[in-house]
Amino acid sequence: MPDPLYYVNPDRNLPWNDLPLLPIHNDLFRTTEIYEMLGNAKAALARLQGQSAVIPNQGVLINTISLQEAKASSAIENIFTTDDELYKAYSDQNQETQGVSKEVLRYREALWTGHQYLLEQTGFNERYFIQVFQELKQTTDEIRPDFINTTIKQGGTGPNSGQVIYTPPRGTAVIEEKLANLIEFINDDERYKIDHLLKMVIAHFQFEAIHPFRDGNGRSGRVFNIHYLTKKGLLDFPILFLSRYILDTKQDYYSGLMGVSQRGDWKNWLLYMLRAIEVTSNITYHKINDIVEAKDSILNHVKSEHKNISQPEALIQMIFEQPFTKVKHLQEAKIFSENTARKYLNQLCDIRVLEKKTLEGHHYYLNLELYRILSE
């Protein structure tokens, strides 16, 4: 009997220390169906990259799309916050932010600190993964120590709730060996000549299967997805709204991971993640278009109908860099004095571009169109 193409986890209750090293067998991904889906995903991602590259001020994307990605990825782990809470927390980020919103903002910070770290490195390394994890969890902890017996259990309240569905490798040396192999796989494009999107999807499963940290592995793995795309030049900035699709199809995501570990079903996992890239590339592309069109429309209206407002370009740019604007944002950017900033923001409220909100005794100006677009 021929050897199987992939050796699965024989007992989900025992640590999978024999997790196969990468690469996987070519026959597991070289199929017509997978390559057709790969073509669709690459085309959608390339269109997104082309559109994002022509936007004059990337702050429109950096401070909005990445917040939505942070919110969705956190929600996958049952960390929920409202849009108002999140945007308020981001607006107040120089002050002490508490609770769930702080957790979500840590994801965004991990996106950007990891992105900056990789700009200074020739490739991925163990320190990259540890720094992303530490940023997410605000901890000095590193790779799981030998004595930690980690298991993944069935969630929910059904009859199988609480049952072990997967036990990752155990032992620091084993984990570091698997992680070193993963890092070599994603860095070496000469030895492992696999399309970048396929390699990202394979690597994401492998990272989740290794499960190198006590907690935060899901979010760390989703941060890696976006960083891989930027490191390989498929995106200039980590703005893909990838977690949106995963959140909407959460059960399929976890079923795909289990399908590989329990049945060696790489086909459905690869198809699922490639579809996620295609769908979320299109969502992000349309959100960018909508944001830019709304910004240009409002700017043209202000310039033609409200000529008493000086520096309209700078003013409109600022209110599109995050959903909640404060007077001090315009002051700190050295655009207007406090009184002038307040006057202009109130004037934008009068023409229904903004809506003034009072939250916990502080005044915020909500960009109604930006809020609508991000909420869709």
Image (cartoon, rainbow, N blue to C red):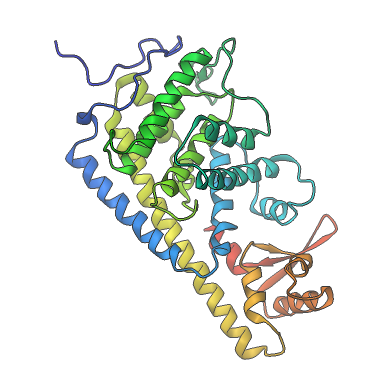
Horizontally, is 257 left or right of 354 in the view? left
Residue 162, quarter of picture: top right
Residue 118: x, y in percent? 51, 44
Residue 78, quarter of picture: top right
Q: Residue at x 38, y 63 (%)?
A: 50
Horizontally, is 28 left or right of 73 in the view? left
Does residue 167 appear anywhere in the picture?
A: no
Residue 67 drawn above or below residue 261: below
Q: Residue at x 73, y 40 (%)?
A: 99
Residue 258, quarter of picture: top left
Image quadrant holding the N terminus, namely top left
Does residue 73 appear anywhere in the picture?
A: yes
Residue 273 drawn above or below residue 322: above
Residue 20: x, y in percent? 34, 19
Q: Residue at x 56, y 34 (%)?
A: 77
| Depth order, front residue of 39/135 | 135
Q: Residue at x 17, y 41 (%)?
A: 32
